[in-house]
Image (tube, rainbow, N blue to C red):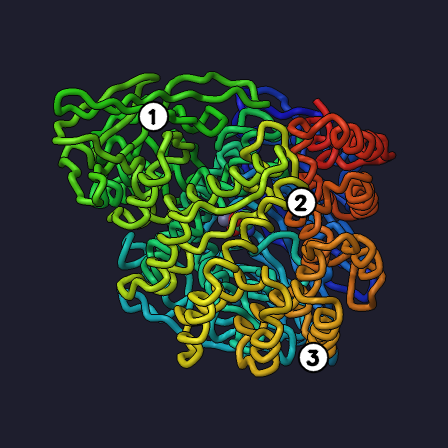
Amino acid sequence: MKEIFLKDYIEPNYLIPNVELYINILEKEAVVTSMLTIVKNCSGDTPLVLDGKELKLHSVLLDGKEIFDFDYSDDKLTIKNLPNKAVLTTTVSIDPYNNKSMEGFYKSGNILCTQNEAEGFRRVTFFSDRPDVMSKYTITVEGDKKVFPKLLSNGNLVESTPIGENRLRNKWEDPFAKPCYLVAIVAGDLESITDSFTTKSGRVIDLEIYTDPGQSNKAYHAMESLKKSMKWDEDTFGLEYDLDLYMVVAVDSFNAGAMENKGLNIFNSAYVLADPKTATDSDFEGVEGVIAHEYFHNWTGNRVTCRDWFQLTLKEGLTVFRDQEFSSDKTDRTVKRISDVSILRSHQYPEDKGPNSHPIKPESYFTIDNFYTATVYEKGAEVIRMIFTLLGKEKFRAGMDLYFKRHTGEAVTTEDFVSAMEDASGFDLTQFKRWYSQAGTPVISVDSSYNNGEFTLKVKQEIPKTSYNCPREPLFFPFPIGLYDKDGRDLTPEAGKNLIISKEYEEFTFKTENRVIPSLAQGFSAPIEVRYNYSTDELITLLTADKDKFNKFDAARRLTMISIDTIIGDIRTNRECSIDKRIIESYKKLLTDPTLEKRYLATLLYIPEVKDIALTMEEYDFKLANRARNIYLKQLATELKSNLFRLFEDNLAIDAVAERSIKNSALSILSFLGDDIAEIAQKQFALAENMTDYMAAFMSLQKCSDTVRIEANKSFKEKWKDNFLVMNKWFITQAIRDDETVLDDIKKLSLDELFDNTNPNRIRSLFGAFAGRNSAHFHSEDGQGYKFIADKIIDIDSYNSHVSSSLASAFQPYKYLGEKQAKLMKEQLIRISQKEGISTGLNEIILKTLK
Ligand code: DPP
Ligand code: ZN
């Protein structure tokens, strides 16, 4: 295993300005001929070293003449004594049909497609597989026209030629230079829907979305989302699409969500196909968000790309920020913000406390695949958001304009981005830049005092020690606050709205008539954890009165966590558990408050995941967390029963997102009463016209007695067995059941004819959901959960290291477990590490976890 360091970066020794690829798809293999224009970019007699993995080499030609003086070993093709400029032609065979890694060229269902980010292109042909080698590509794809009537690649179709009776050859040209990770090739019998978009400068862009036959009628929402994204990027950032054609292809087997290949996005079908019958409201939003994300990459990622993979957050953090803003504009800004922060808190915060903690710009890696993380993406987006907050909308836009003016067509670094922001705004981001190189979630402990009409906030920032070795200097971030009196009157002074924290310890004093309640880091102004010793009454005041809707939500979250924490204490000391009556009363008021938006109210009915609770414990006890959570939710449901039933019934009549959201949130809490909700849930399950209601009812029925649950499971499976995406939901539901028999059932389901252990969506739905979302049972006391997942990781790693490595992140809590659980987990970690032929990616995760 070789560790790669950012500090070792050197410019490429050879550039490849032009590439002509010819991919001939045959029955059992594909033959790839590539003609590379190679230009020396260094002095001396440095050899040309190209990457190539699992390629069957047929020939190497230099300026048209076959040569034999080369070495192909250890995934490198080395050629010495090259002239300053030459055309290198290689011909290789690859086997897309048996490529289960889902990197490079592979088969998904009946479609052949590529996934080249980060380092898949080396499985297609010999190349300098690094993002700073940018080339203009002409790609010709040939195949049997009955099997592959559609042969697609990047850019514009310049020729389509029938070859004899049975074959077709399509030639594609992309006028823009790009790194090889953005190359895409698709071959298949595809159905499509088409549309067009007229850009602000009047160019007409053809839009095409391709799916498996019979599926394209589910692509209209994706098409609308694409057009909205194109318009939004013009309106918001002045960015216009630059080719004449934009294609999206949906495939069922895909390691990630989607891929932004230039002009030819390839998507996990889960993020393209949606209609109300088969997709939930949240699926619809997922499609819109991911379509937007990949589209926005056209500028932030493709036209301006990364110099090296350490810069990944340059394109991902920025593009996530852009897609979050887009979705906020298109849906409900506060609800979207709450959902994004919840994802950050439940994925990125644990990552930062765990073995793979890293800054958004890491300095070393063994395999870059392990750094497509919540830190690089979600925390990366928060870092961009802080720049946005500090500079303000206009200056941020000026910074973006300057970034594109300076760097379009280049492969750059995060420093280049920050410099553009500084130069356009005059804002000094020197200290701010520490966010790029420091890991860990900063803990901001706030204390307050009140004396003689002065309210003082004492703010202390602490950068925690993490598994990643880096400086822990004070960070610079916005920290807007509000002040409320005990009756909820807003006393926020102007100065409070623009507070900035930059030192380890700071004090801020405000003149107030009485002691006040602070609302801190409003809008979730930074990816930090704010600690303040709020009393229950203070939180209730904020829950009722805070005008900052994020912090109003956060008051609900804090109250919930306090209630659960109290229950944990009660369980530990054998006391009777009950929720504070004041909290119940304030919820009753909220549930009948007509001024609250329904979707927003649904977020206030906050239900934490078991692992969110465990994360607050010094020693993670998932079982106890689960028990306390169940007690809390059952009591909440009992106390609020009539209010929640009313809320449910009041929102039955209107079938729209907001009504479904509040109605189903009510149902979800009520489901902790078990069979009490069987009747209404069964009715909804039987009559639901849309997947949102159907799923909500189905999930609730899981909490009812066995006969009710089993009947629902059967009926669901019978109805949807032929729908791949819907059945993923069914598998997830089985995997996250809170029941002692869940693991046995999962074992049986892994042999089900509808399960496929080579399909990443299915693996994530059953094994991933169990390991990641069913904490209480994954961490079972007999260690069987660990053993089962370890078995699966070992098996999957032999063909798909991407998926095995991501499944292994379930072992993240290792060093926070109690002695007994830690021992059980360790046995499995060691067993995995001893696996013969373990992939580099998995090995990196396991060794870091054990360290
Ligand atoms: N396809 C992944 C994404 O869009 C990696 N670039 O984030
Ligand atoms: Zn991305």
Q: Amino acid at mark 3?
A: Lys
First of labels 3, 1 by sequence position: 1
**Mark 3 or 1, closer to the camera:** 1
List the residue tagged with mark 2: 775
Q: Is mark 2 within 8 Å of ligand 1?
A: no
Quadrant in the picture for residue 167: bottom right
Q: Amino acid at mark 1?
A: Val
Q: Secondary structure at mark 3?
A: helix
Crowd tier of the residue under label 3, counting other residues whose Cα lies within 10 Å: few below 14, some 14–19, many 20 or above: few
Q: Quadrant of the N terminus?
A: top right
Q: Secondary structure at mark 2?
A: helix
* Rendered view: 778 above or below 600: above
* Rendered view: 172 above or below 484: below
- At 42% from the left and 60% from the top, the residue drawn is 602
Q: Amino acid at mark 2?
A: Ser
The Cα–Cα distance between marks 3 and 2, rounded to whole angstroms, is 30 Å
The Cα–Cα distance between marks 3 and 1, rounded to whole angstroms, is 54 Å
List the residue tagged with mark 1: 446
First of labels 3, 2 by sequence position: 3
**Tag 2 near tag 1, CB within 8 Å:** no
**Mark 3 or 2, closer to the camera:** 2
Query: Camera-side residue: 764 or 63?
Result: 764
Q: Is mark 3 within 8 Å of ligand 1?
A: no
List the residue tagged with mark 3: 719
The Cα–Cα distance between marks 2 and 1, rounded to whole angstroms, is 32 Å
Q: Secondary structure at mark 1?
A: strand
- At 53% from the left and 76% from the top, the residue drawn is 275
- At 36% from the left and 35% from the top, the residue drawn is 535
**Tag 3 near tag 1, CB within 8 Å:** no
